[in-house]
Image (cartoon, helix red, strand yellow):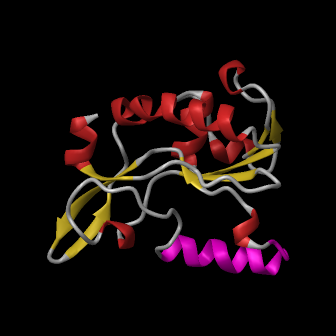
Amino acid sequence: MENLCRAGRTEGPCRSAPNRRTPRASAPSARRSAAAGCTATRPFVGPAGHLLDRALADAGVDRDSLCLTNAVKHFKFKLRGTRRIHEKPARSEVVACRPWLVTEFRAVRPRLVLLLGATAAQLLYGTGFRLTQHQGERLDPPEEFAGPRALA
């Protein structure tokens, strides 16, 4: 886990919501990672979070009614000047986050999980999973995530 903290910022667990619909993202944003260190923060606050907020508003869904979390619990980046540019996590980093996500699923027991990105989808379904081939499909969860349906 120490290596993940050195690689970037660590995300905290899902904040439970009554209706248990749980979007997942691929990784935390650079905006939440503005300060150095390994600190739990709120997911979906950067540019992708603003896009998610608009989509939720258009769909008439209150963000606070959702349990939002990240599948990968750290933000991996490269510095480019003063900007932190997102870098895809290594497979070992994704695999290291899987037990956290399994524990979150068991604690929150979401009715539906939205997979927002290839990294999140591959964390659940393996490296051979192609999000573009399953976009919009309802999928049965892997056995260890038993319970919720996933929507790719």
Above or below for 30 versus 108? below
In-image side of 100 versus 22 (left or right):
left
Q: Residue at x 22, y 37 (%)?
A: 2
Above or below for 8 versus 109? below
Q: Residue furthest left?
A: 81
Q: How many numbered circles does the render carry?
A: 0
In-image side of 127 versus 21 (left or right):
left
Residue sitting nearer the eye, 76 or 20: 20
Q: Residue furthest top?
A: 143
User: Could you tell me which quadrant the N terminus lies in?
Assistant: top left
In magenta, the rendered stretch is 47-61
> Residue 52's x, y, as percent?
64, 71
> Residue 70's x, y, as percent?
52, 51
Above or below for 118 versus 53? above
Residue sitting nearer the eye, 42 or 113: 42
* Magenta residue check for 51: yes
Above or below for 127 versus 74? above
* Magenta residue check for 139: no
Q: Residue at x 18, y 66 (%)?
A: 79
